[in-house]
Amino acid sequence: MKIRLTIALLAALTVMGAVAAQDSGSAPAAGQNGGGWGGNGQRGGRGGFGGMGLMGRGLMGTVTEVAADHYTIKTDAGDIYTVHYSANTRIFKMPAGMRGQGGQGGGQGMGEGRGMGRGGNPPQQLQASDIKVGDVIEARGETDAAAKSVGAVAVVQLDPEQVKQIREMEANYGKTWLMGKVTAIDGVKVTLTGAVDNAPHSFVADENTTFRRRRDPITLADIQVGDTVRVDGAEKDGVFTATTVGVMGMAQGENPGAPRPAPQQ
């Protein structure tokens, strides 16, 4: 559960940052379009660090030991894992400026992917020796929960602000925000499968709810089963009421090469 949660929360951070950038009308820096940095540290793949998709497995923890071929980390749950790395392991530092709600920049993750960080900055490549005791890292690769080990394909160094955001998002998921794939729509009630916990959640819309697909204003009627949405709002008496709903990616049947109409003023 914690393994999937870390990846999903990192994906949520980038998606939420992208929505904020889109709403403000900002565009990616020249040369930053595309799927971001793939899981092997190369540009252009979905589901990698730029896209921060949910593909692959990962684990976040604080480094307690640094050795020539492995790191030892302690997770928030108190588990001790060995992260094995080699010359083929890609090691990066997440760029400062990756924000959650109201922030800037960020690859879209589940959407189009536009690089990561403020102004589309890519991750900074590190040497294995740049990771120190006390750093918080996220290791991606084959995880063996029984052996408490990760064969790392990639290791990401996170800064304290990013770690704080991840932990706050974990605590607030289902209370102030939701993200996931829509599975059913019944009147003003929308049910989705949570991207963080893979569990069913629902929210309701009212006259104060605003909807967007990228920069474009839409309505509840434009949301379809299969859409991936990010929802902000509040839970009261067991009902999550949405204040804003952002739909990621294109509508079904939309031509990505077709010109888009200008937003209404």
Image: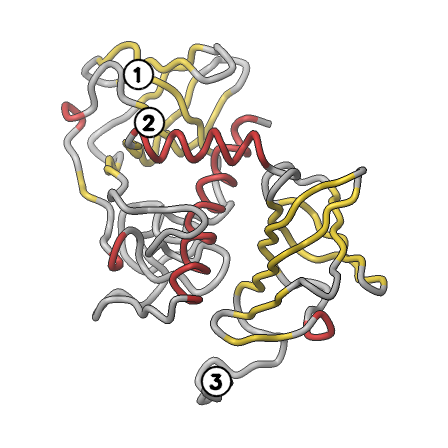
Residue 124 position within the rendered picture, expressed as x and y whole percent measured from the top left: 19, 43
Q: Residue drawn 58% across and 64% down?
A: 247
Q: How many marks?
A: 3
Q: Is residue 211 above or below residue 125?
A: below
Q: Is residue 201 above or below residue 37?
A: above
The mark that comes first in sequence, 3 or 2, is 2
Q: Secondary structure at mark 3?
A: loop
The amino acid marked with disc number 1 is Val
The amino acid marked with disc number 2 is Ile
Quadrant position of the N terminus in the picture: top right
Task: Specify the label residue 137 is tagged with.
Answer: 2
The amino acid marked with disc number 3 is Gln
Q: Residues within 10 Å of mark 1 (few under 14, many from 20)?
A: many
Q: Residue drawn 76% across and 55% down?
A: 204
Q: Which residue is mark 3?
A: 265
Task: Specify the label residue 63 is tagged with.
Answer: 1
Residue 264 position within the rendered picture, expressed as x and y whole percent measured from the top left: 51, 85
